[in-house]
């Protein structure tokens, strides 16, 4: 994420929605019995191109979710959304988790599996084809999806860097 630091944004706490991706119960065995704690993965976004993920761990479910939401608000990124979908095809990778996201036409919906679906819906992408290849671990899938979304470039940026008009970019 170091090279995509320019896409990071400050959390404007207004209208950020949160979605629980995964809740994991972890048992630590001590001489007095088992001690349970919870690890929560949460994605937050405004449905207009802002998305972030976070991990929270605590002895209590609600506390771990609250910690995860706080963590997610600290690493938000801006995603270019063009006509309800993504501007171009993109691959993302994190650890063994690999994802492929493709733009789709209107009316397609979000075609994606579990953890990816949560990230794409919260980001505000309405039509997309997505495939998770490799790890099915929600931690890696969420981070790989955010990596793919962070690598996306808007049509305006591409046109500006090539010094051509938007019409020439799409028709040329």
Image: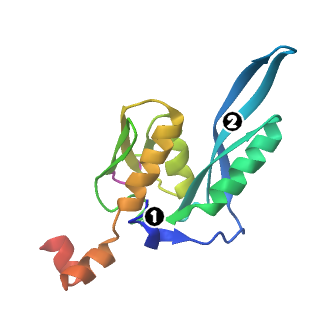
**Residue 29, located in which quarter of the rendered image?**
top right
Q: Quadrant of the N terminus?
A: bottom left
Q: Main secondary structure of the magenta part?
A: loop
Question: Which residue is nearer to you in this view: 150 or 113?
Answer: 150
Question: Which residue is nearer to you in this view: 73 or 156?
Answer: 73
Q: For residue 79, which numbered disc appears in the image?
A: 1
Q: Secondary structure at mark 1?
A: loop
Drawn side of residue 165 relative to residue 18, left or right: left
The part of the chain drawn in magenta is 103-107
Q: Secondary structure at mark 2?
A: strand
Drawn side of residue 159 relative to residue 10, left or right: left
Inspect this view and state whether residue 31 appears.
yes
Q: Is residue 13 magenta?
A: no
Q: Where is residue 37 shown, x and y percent of the image?
A: 77, 30
Mark 2 vs 1, N-terminal side: 2
Q: Where is residue 10 shown, x and y percent of the image?
A: 61, 72
Q: For residue 39, which numbered disc appears in the image?
A: 2
Drawn side of residue 103 relative to residue 66, left or right: left
């Amino acid at each position: 994420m170091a090279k995509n630091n320019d896409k990071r944004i400050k959390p404007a706490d207004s209208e950020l929605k949160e979605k629980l991706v995964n809740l994991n119960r972890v048992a630590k065995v001590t001489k007095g019995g088992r001690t349970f704690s919870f690890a929560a993965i949460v994605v937050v976004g405004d449905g207009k191109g802002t998305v972030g993920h976070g991990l929270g761990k605590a002895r209590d479910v609600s506390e771990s979710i609250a910690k995860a939401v706080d963590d997610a608000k600290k690493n938000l990124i801006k995603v270019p959304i063009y006509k309800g979908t993504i501007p171009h095809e993109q691959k993302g990778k994190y650890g063994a988790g690999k994802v492929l996201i493709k733009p789709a036409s209107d009316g397609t919906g979000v075609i994606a599996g579990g953890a990816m679906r949560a990230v794409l819906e919260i980001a505000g992408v309405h039509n997309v084809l997505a495939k998770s290849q490799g790890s099915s671990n929600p931690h890696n899938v969420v981070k790989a999806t955010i990596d793919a979304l962070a690598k996306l470039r808007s049509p305006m940026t591409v046109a500006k860097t090539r010094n051509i008009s938007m019409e020439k970019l799409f028709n040329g």
